[in-house]
Image (spheres, helix red, strand yellow):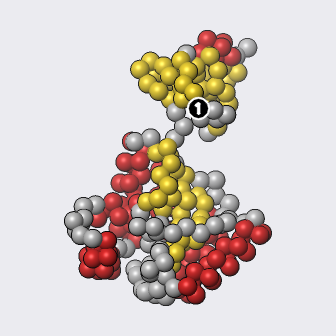
Amino acid sequence: MPERIDALIHPRWTLAVEPRVEVAEGMSVALDKGRILAMLPTADARRRFSPDTSHERPAHVLMPGLINAHCHAGMTLLRGYADDLPLEAWLTERIWPAEARLVTPEFVADGTRLAAAEMLLGGTTCFSDMYYFPDVVAEVARESGLRAVVGMIALEFPTPWARDVDEYIAKGLEVHDRYRADALITTTFAPHAPYSTSDGTLTRIRRRATSFATTRAKPTSACFEVA
């Protein structure tokens, strides 16, 4: 008797990346309770499983979700703003002053929702983010069904998120504690950049990250803005 499952997907092509990258035709993917059960020839899948939903995709390729390794999702609402300026002028003369005036939790939520929709439309299912109000970014990512690595940012000057390094770190750790067991959200220390974060702050974050890695608790690393 066929096994009942949530869904079968029958694409024309299936792209696998493990244990090696290869494209196959005539394969189907079985899904149940949010997990992939099997990838097998379509004829075998139809005999083995009784899905609640069957997705016929004769002109499509099925592939693993893409990963956006570095983004500032909330800044989608600032797209194109002063983008003709060099980096230093863009940051100090336009972006940071604009963020001081405009950025709120609602701003970040709206920008992240737009970014999430665009990422899903393009096949991205996981993103690494560095922006203010990482708690809001995490909430929107979960709403959207996206996996997210949420950066706990740090800078040497006040922003809408925090007043000083102590508050950046303290609020970041609160976000970490809130999502430490979440299936979709991971946290990471995210000092902005070497030119906007002091050596003392970087050392402090490095020690904290090492402590987390030693105890095998999330987060286990630190990431930088590299622009």
**Residue at the (49%, 88%) spot, across then down:** 164
Where residue 16 appears, as percent x and y from the top left, is: 58, 31
55 vs 17: above or below: above
**Residue at the (55%, 16%) spot, across then down:** 26
Amino acid type shown at disc 1: Val
**Residue at the (55%, 85%) spot, across then down:** 199
Question: Relative to 173, is 3 on the left or the right?
Answer: right
Locate the C terminus by quadrant: bottom left
Residue position for label 1: 21
Where residue 137 appears, as percent x and y from the top left, is: 47, 63
Question: Relative to 29, is 94 on the left or the right?
Answer: left
**Residue at the (38%, 63%) spot, across then down:** 74
**Residue situated in front as seen by the camera: 226 or 30:** 226
Q: Residue furthest right?
A: 215
Q: Is residue 172 visible?
A: yes
**Residue situated in front as seen by the camera: 128 or 180:** 128
Q: Is residue 167 visible?
A: no
